[in-house]
Amino acid sequence: MADIASATHLRIDSTTFDLAEETRFAVDGQKQSLRVVFQAWEHVDSSAADYISDCEAKGIPTLTFLHRTDLTTWLSGSADQSQFIEEPKEARKADAAEERAAKRARADPFLEEIVSNERDLIDHNSFLRGVKQIDFSYVARECEIKLVNVLKKKTAAPVKSVAAVTKNKNPIIIISPSPSALLTMANIKEFLENGDFVDPANLSSSGGNALLKVSRTSAKLGGTVNFLVVENVAQLTKPEYWDRVVGIFTTGQAWQFKQYPDGSNPHKLFRRIKGFYVGFSGDAVPKSVTDWNVELVEVDRNRRFRDRQVVEGFWDALEKGMLARGMGK
């Protein structure tokens, strides 16, 4: 089977379905595509962390724990009904017909007497379920909060909490080794920690450090987090190091990614990891930066009082990207 992210149709036996077609499964009134439904079913036995990670990698919208559980339970046949699946028109017509019949019975005293003596036949499932509709959504929400958090802490998937990452496993930021880069090992610490940008053209050296630690205190991330900044990716010798990469600075030059795991596909790389391009305000931005969905960080050439605002914008974008990957409170 083709990758669900690139496939256009789904074949079941001899019937073919369009993956973009809307289904009767709706979230907040929005009908979900067959692609979203099939992706959830493919991960019926996966942890929440694995499911979310794969959806992000393939660019497919995710369902919450509550919606996914309700959907897969219905698809497996374990449940006869789903609160998120709309009734087909035929069922609604049948209900309307029943209502009209009831009205006719009320209009005719003889029919009304017959209807009053009718008794519904129920099986053991209906008896156990009862007649009163009880909203157990609060239980599902409680389970989602507790169960998903436990899974995120215990799973070995790339989605990790900051608590796990920062215990001797700091998040990693990669900067470009290009000579044209405005952020280097010599000026990035001062910029990210204190909001002070120093033009690398005014520095006597590029820094000489193979590794830097940058600290960030953030309410979103639950306190102070130490980030490791590297320029030479040859230091990232294990897959687990790449799992901790949360941000990449690029100058828009593809050669930067030759040694990256996804080096041949920057589009795929920046769907999983936040990308940033630092340039002077008013300067032309490389077309590749726009094509790769990389965020622009604009530094003023002369007005240094704007640096703090620019840095806070960068941190806000980076932290949101980390939270989307399950890294945070």
Image (tube, rainbow, N blue to C red):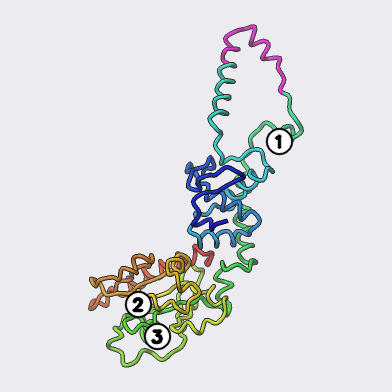
Q: Residue at x 33, y 71 (%)?
A: 297
Residue 220 shows up from this direction: no
Residue at the front extreme of this rendering = 14
Tell me the CA gap for discs 1 and 2. Answer: 61 Å
Dot 2, crowdedness within 10 Å: few (<14), some or many (≥20)? some
Tell me the CA gap for discs 3 and 1. Answer: 65 Å
Tell me the CA gap for discs 3 and 2. Answer: 15 Å
The residue tagged 3 is 185
Q: SS class of the residue under badge 3? A: loop
Q: Main secondary structure of the magenta part?
A: helix
- As drawn, 90 above or below 234: above
Q: Earlier in the sequence, mark 3 or mark 1?
A: 1
Give residue 322's position: percent from left, percent from top. Answer: 48, 67
| Front disc: 3 or 2 | 3
Residue toward you, 258 or 329: 258
- Amino acid bearing label 3: Met
Q: Earlier in the sequence, mark 1 or mark 2?
A: 1
- Amino acid bearing label 2: Gly
The residue tagged 2 is 195
Dot 1, crowdedness within 10 Å: few (<14), some or many (≥20)? few
Give residue 43's position: percent from left, percent from top. Answer: 61, 56
Q: SS class of the residue under badge 1? A: helix
Q: Quadrant of the N terminus?
A: bottom right
Residue toward you, 253 or 164: 253
Give residue 125's position: percent from left, percent from top. Answer: 74, 35
The residue tagged 1 is 129
**Image quadrant in which you'd find residue 318:** bottom left
Q: Which residues are magenta?
A: 102-120
- As drawn, 14 above or below 101: below
